[in-house]
Image (spheres, rainbow, N blue to C red):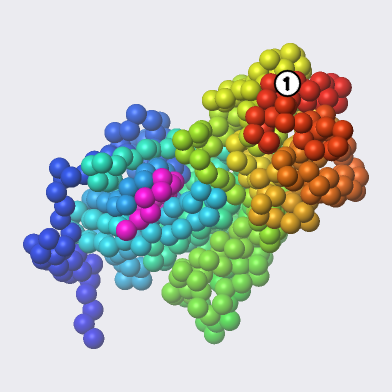
Amino acid sequence: MTIFNNNTLKTITIIITASLYSLGISGQDNSKYNWWNPAKNNFPAIEGQAWPEEVAATYDRLPARAEKTVQSNVWNLSHQSAGLSIRFRTSAKEIIVRYTVTGDLAMQHMPATGVSGVDLYAIDPNGAWKWAAGRYNFGDTITYRFSALSDEAREYRLYLPLYNKVKWMELGVPDHDSIVPLQKRKEKPIVVYGTSIAQGGCASRPGLAWTSLLDRQMDRQVINLGFSGNGKLEPPVTALVSEIDAKIFVLDCLPNISGLPPAEIQERIITAVTTLRKKRPVTPILLVEHATPSMQMINTIGDGNYVTANKALQDAYEKLQSTGTKKLYILPASQINFDLSATVDGVHPADVGMVAYAKAYESSLRIILNEPMGNINTTMPCRQYRELSFYDWDARHNEILTMNSVQAPKVLLIGNSITHFWGGLPAAPLARGADSWKEVLDPLGTRNLGFGYDRVENVLWRVYHDELDGYQASKIYIMIGTNNLGINTDEEIVAGLKLLVTAIRQRQPQAGILLSGILPRTNMEKRIVRINQLIMQMAGEQQVQFINPGTVLLKADATIDASLFTDGLHPNGTGYSKLAHFLQPYLK
């Protein structure tokens, strides 16, 4: 068997690539494409960076000032783009990515597609993930071509190389199409400080690193501070980590310190946790055991005693708990539960091991962050983007997070287009009840958390993604479910509402919760009466107040009063006025 080293592989790759270009397989006429360089965008377009305004190079992971404080190995590894991604929208049926890197294209135990490749995923209008297969050529310039894509405008997420430094990158679409870059997500990120396993070794594609899998499973930005061979809980790095306003800190460094004496392992863990706690007193911290002991192996490689190291972590955890450290958790090796196919070498996960890691993390984080997920769509939080021409769902969510951080609302109206079209802030393209909102709801300090086309599961996503965090409301009014009527049973809708009420109460325990019945709509009056009875029963079980404002929109025969609606679903100005005055005494 002939074994090639990295330089030989790179030389062969360049020759093959040159041949492909000469055959016209990978070349493209630049005049027929619109090219976009993320480095030249007018706002930071790279996801996964905690210090986007401070990096020395576009695709770095640490701020430039870190060069003076961290070890040289960590600084050099921080130039590798592990965990970084680019979010954008396009309706193009073809996307080309071309870029250059500085290091070897592949490693002995990890393919070029993982070390130096990119990986493209899309989100459909209902929040479901899709993977895009691409044709690629590795050479001095690496090129990926994704073709035969849907012409439906959608959101894409491009994951960048795991073990290489990106020098330059451009994305191209046919000249009649365009790329719309998206702002960084404003929700607090999951921050991971770890080893080569966190960096992505040895995933076959960037999107299969466990941090990327978790990014999609939780649909929350993950800051990947994994440094191959150098995740050692060093104080200068931990100090940088503490600067980040995180949703949770993950310390997964045991594989790089398992060879140390148990007392030193404990000391490093306690020092790291203490550093984070000093700067972030209430942010949860998750300590992670070494996963290798969960495998059925007859031997191990390396110098570390993994079982002893895990015991040292458990002892450090007990000491921290005994001193009153709160919101500290452990992810045990038994929960990661590697099978015999999980790794390439007994330590670094293959793709199947990455999936096991991500599942274990998701299970743990959903408990810690109070983000449970059921098995029917109404209990599975997801984003949506169903009508591109009407409004930008993602932008409205970001606007609400910004507004909440500047001025906390006192009253929240949570709903779909019926609420969205009413009035107030954030402003919508259409406000049919602006007068009644201004008269009744503005004086109460009300914020409009209505999103057109939202279903129960979309509101659940928004609640899980910080729209109710960081302030204390006095009253929260929930009116959601009408958009689920065409796809769900009454029982499924009520199950989703029950989970939603629980999620809201956990985040706003002092607020009075008002759960509304679904408003009447043409030709569905009888069904809505039935489902509202179920909602009322569930509200009683959950000990929240049920109200039924839709009764003011009905005629004496229990059918809708068409004079109060624009279309049999959305109220007109008069209808909104009736709703406002019905709600006024409940919201005070």
Nearer to us in this view, 565 or 517: 565
Residue visible at 29% across and 52% down?
Answer: 94
Nearer to us in this view, 99 or 276: 99
Rendering quarter of residue 523: top right
Residue 70 spot, x, y in % from top left? 42, 43
Tell me the crowding category of disc 1: few under 14, some 14 to 19, or many 20 or more residues within 10 angstroms, Cα based: some
Q: Main secondary structure of the magenta part?
A: loop
Q: Is residue 116 visible?
A: no
Q: In the image, 114: left or right of 264?
A: left
Quadrant holding the N terminus: bottom left
Residue visible at 72% across and 40% down?
Answer: 521
Instruction: Classify 148 as above or below 563.
Output: below
Residue 53 spot, x, y in % from top left? 40, 31
* In the image, farthest residue toward the front: 557
Quadrant holding the C terminus: top right
Q: Is residue 275 covered in magenta? A: no
Rendering quarter of residue 439: top right
Query: In the rendered image, which residue does mark 1 sit on?
Result: 574
Q: In the image, 511: left or right of 574?
A: right
Instruction: Classify 282 as above or below 426.
Output: below
Residue 527 spot, x, y in % from top left? 79, 49
Residue visible at 10% across and 64% down?
Answer: 23
Provide the secondary structure element on which disc 1 rests: helix
Residue visible at 46% across and 69% down?
Answer: 351
- Amino acid on which the number 1 mark rests in the picture: Thr
- The range drawn in magenta is 148-163
Q: Is residue 386 visible?
A: yes
Residue 525 spot, x, y in % from top left? 78, 43
* In the image, farthest residue toward the left: 22
Q: In the image, 483: left or right of 245?
A: right
Nearer to us in this view, 532 or 280: 532
Q: What is the total number of numbered labels drawn onto the structure image?
A: 1
